[in-house]
Amino acid sequence: MGLRDKYSESNPANRVRPTLRFVFSHPAHALAIFFGAGCLRPGPGTWGTAAGVLVWIAMVKLGASLALLAALIVLAFVLGAWASHRTGIDLGVEDAGCIVIDEVAAVWLVCLMLPQNPVGWLAAFVSFRVFDIVKLPPASTIDAKMKNGVGVMLDDLFAAIWAIFAVILTDMIINRVAGPMFLGLF
């Protein structure tokens, strides 16, 4: 399925419009739709990613250790697979656009790997959204073939890995050419 088809209004995954009543009717729904962020339109994946970054910033500002944040990412991936699967069944669509816990957990992984400052958080948001939309392999294969909660979470995990790689490579190139101007990682 191409990008045009994936994001088309005729795709059943994009026609599902859960209500807040549905979101809070079961813990799996609340987690999968990230407490309503997935109900926002247009672009629920972008809204979910933004909500994920905002929650990440709050956790960092509240003093969460990197070890705690890493544990929360693992927990989000595990519980996200369950919640996505259950919510997909209840909505009648395996990977409904409103299911955004995959974006949240994945952007948290990107945030974890970058500096904890506004430039790092913005780089995490933008780079993850690009790679989540483009879906380079193996994310594209997983997205097309694994129609369950694990598949929902796994394709975004690989998009996050691509995003981390791209930001670090960009940082290395900019810093070699112009000095430490971007993230200053290398």
Image (cartoon, rainbow, N blue to C red):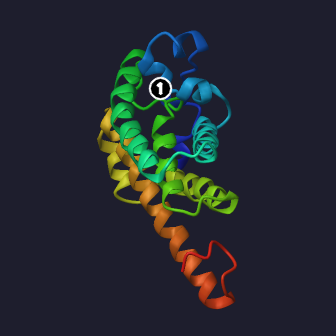
Q: Which percent across, then down, holds residue 121?
A: 63, 55
Quadrant housing the C terminus: bottom right
Name which quarter of the figure residue 185 lies in.
bottom right
**Who's the residue at 41% across and 50% down the image?**
67
Residue 69, above or below 119: above
The answer to whether residue 154 is seen in the rendering is: yes
Q: Which percent across, then down, holds residue 94?
A: 38, 28
**Who's the residue at 67% across and 31% down the image?**
41
* In-image side of 185 versus 145 (left or right): right
Q: Which percent across, then down, holds residue 103?
A: 50, 42
Residue 186, above or below 51: below
Q: Nearer the viewer, residue 108 or 8?
A: 108
**Who's the residue at 54% across and 22% down the image?**
16
Q: Nearer the viewer, residue 82 or 71?
A: 71
Amino acid type indicated by mark 1: Leu
Name which quarter of the figure residue 39 lies in.
top right
Residue 57, above or below 93: below
Q: Secondary structure at mark 1?
A: helix
* In-image side of 3 versus 54 (left or right): left
Q: Nearer the viewer, residue 25 or 117?
A: 117
Q: Which residue is mark 1?
A: 31
